[in-house]
């Protein structure tokens, strides 16, 4: 049990019940809406959407806006009525009635536990002193690899040590999407990035964070200039914004916990790009400093589908 304060009142809340692998694998659509809160059905739905190239963001099993927006994207691609609600047609097209498992057993390797960063400081000047802004926990690394919320990964594996040789359950997310993207729509009102091939077919569809009113994302039609994997980050307070009161320019090291995550897709408007994030769970509620922010795994997948000259259209 834990105690929390709300509006000056002390309330006692029961801890969330952990879902078991069996509850997730046996979950099926019964014709009703997704249950509120966390459920095995939502876990299964999120993994099936991810496999289809329609990203739900983090797999956490919670009904919410990111999964609803992914459902809308899948319905659009399939030519179904777009309402963001799970129904029999969506469930069938996703393969929900197939016996294929959505979880798999994974053995933590020596490579998984090696090369962690001790800690990530909050202050931008202290971050610049590090050699890498890497993962600080094995569970964090594996959660990103399997597109999962880290807390959900831990809850799915109660008591797991995450040491080399440990057996854990993870989302079976399938293989990355393949093909060539020729145009990307950044749909600001939907907070989604939707990518199409030369025939106008939707290839992938991702949740994103966009700029705020004070630091808006671009408008109009841009294009991809280049793609940088594991980029450093140029902190330029005179050009972009001031953080932590630091007014001198800095170069921050690469790493998934850096300001632009694991990938930078440079756009034809200077200083703007498509990039990763160090906080994937908060992506759909967050705003950026004008760039378009993805989960690290989604933008990494996108980076292998685009090339210089790929159109990037910002739509209101």
Image (cartoon, rainbow, N blue to C red):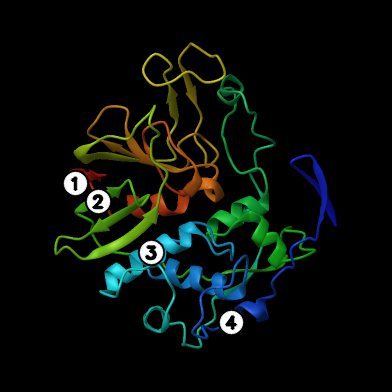
Question: Which type of secondary structure does the marked residue at label 2 adopt?
Answer: strand
Q: Nearer the viewer, residue 246 or 92?
A: 92
Inter-mark Cα distance, 2 to 4: 34 Å
User: Where does label 3 land, which residue?
Assistant: 54
User: Where does label 1 land, which residue?
Assistant: 311
- Residue projecting furthest to the top: 247
Question: Which badge, 4 or 1, is on the more N-terminal residue?
Answer: 4
Determine contact: label 4, label 1, CB under 8 Å. Answer: no
Q: Which of 258 and 21 is in front in this view?
A: 21
User: Where does label 2 land, which residue?
Assistant: 184
Inter-mark Cα distance, 2 to 1: 6 Å
Residue at the location (61% across, 74% down)? 40
Left or right? Give the position of 262 relative to 267: right
Label 1 Cα neighbours within 10 Å, binned few <14 / some 14-19 / many ≥20? many
Indicate which label's residue lies in the foreground, 2 or 4.
Answer: 4
Kindly indicate the quadrant of the structure image that contains residue 142.
bottom right
How many numbered circles does the render carry? 4
Question: Which badge, 2 or 4, is on the more N-terminal residue?
Answer: 4
Question: Which badge, 3 or 4, is on the more N-terminal residue?
Answer: 4
Question: Which badge, 3 or 1, is on the more N-terminal residue?
Answer: 3
Kindly indicate the quadrant of the structure image that contains residue 132.
top right
Label 2 Cα neighbours within 10 Å, binned few <14 / some 14-19 / many ≥20? many
Above or below, 109 relative to 288: below
Question: Which type of secondary structure does the marked residue at label 1 adopt?
Answer: strand
Residue at the location (65% across, 29% down)? 121
In the picture, the disc for residue 183 is none
Determine contact: label 2, label 1, CB under 8 Å. Answer: yes
Label 4 Cα neighbours within 10 Å, binned few <14 / some 14-19 / many ≥20? some
Left or right? Give the position of 155 relative to 77: right
User: Where does label 4 land, which residue?
Assistant: 27
Indicate which label's residue lies in the foreground, 4 or 1.
Answer: 4
Question: Which type of secondary structure does the marked residue at label 3 adopt?
Answer: loop
């Amino acid at each position: 049990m834990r105690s929390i304060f709300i509006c000056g009142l002390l309330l006692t809340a029961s801890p969330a019940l952990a879902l078991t692998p069996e509850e997730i694998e046996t979950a099926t659509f019964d014709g009703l809406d997704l249950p509120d809160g966390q459920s095995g059905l939502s876990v299964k739905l999120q993994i099936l959407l991810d496999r289809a190239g329609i990203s739900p963001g983090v797999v956490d099993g919670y009904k919410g806006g990111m999964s609803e927006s992914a459902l809308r994207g899948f319905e659009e691609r399939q030519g179904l009525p777009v309402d963001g609600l799970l129904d029999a047609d969506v469930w069938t097209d996703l393969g929900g009635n197939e016996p294929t498992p959505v979880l798999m057993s994974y053995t933590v390797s020596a490579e998984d536990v090696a090369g962690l960063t001790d800690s990530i400081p909050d202050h931008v000047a202290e971050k610049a002193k590090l050699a890498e802004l890497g993962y600080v926990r094995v569970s964090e690394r594996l959660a990103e690899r399997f597109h999962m919320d880290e807390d959900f990964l831990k809850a799915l594996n109660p008591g797991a040590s995450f040491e080399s040789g440990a057996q854990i359950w993870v989302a079976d997310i399938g293989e990355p999407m393949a093909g060539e993207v020729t145009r990307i729509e950044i749909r600001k009102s939907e907070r989604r990035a939707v990518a199409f091939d030369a025939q106008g077919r939707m290839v992938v569809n991702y949740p994103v964070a966009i700029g705020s009113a004070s630091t808006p994302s671009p408008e109009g039609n841009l294009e991809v200039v280049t793609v940088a994997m594991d980029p450093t980050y140029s902190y330029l307070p005179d050009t972009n914004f001031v953080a932590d009161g630091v007014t001198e320019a800095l170069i921050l090291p690469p790493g998934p916990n850096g300001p632009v995550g694991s990938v930078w897709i440079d756009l034809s408007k200077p200083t703007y790009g498509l990039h990763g994030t160090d906080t994937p769970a908060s992506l759909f509620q967050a705003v950026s400093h004008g760039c378009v922010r993805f989960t690290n795994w989604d933008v990494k997948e996108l980076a292998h589908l685009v090339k210089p000259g790929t159109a990037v259209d910002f739509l209101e």
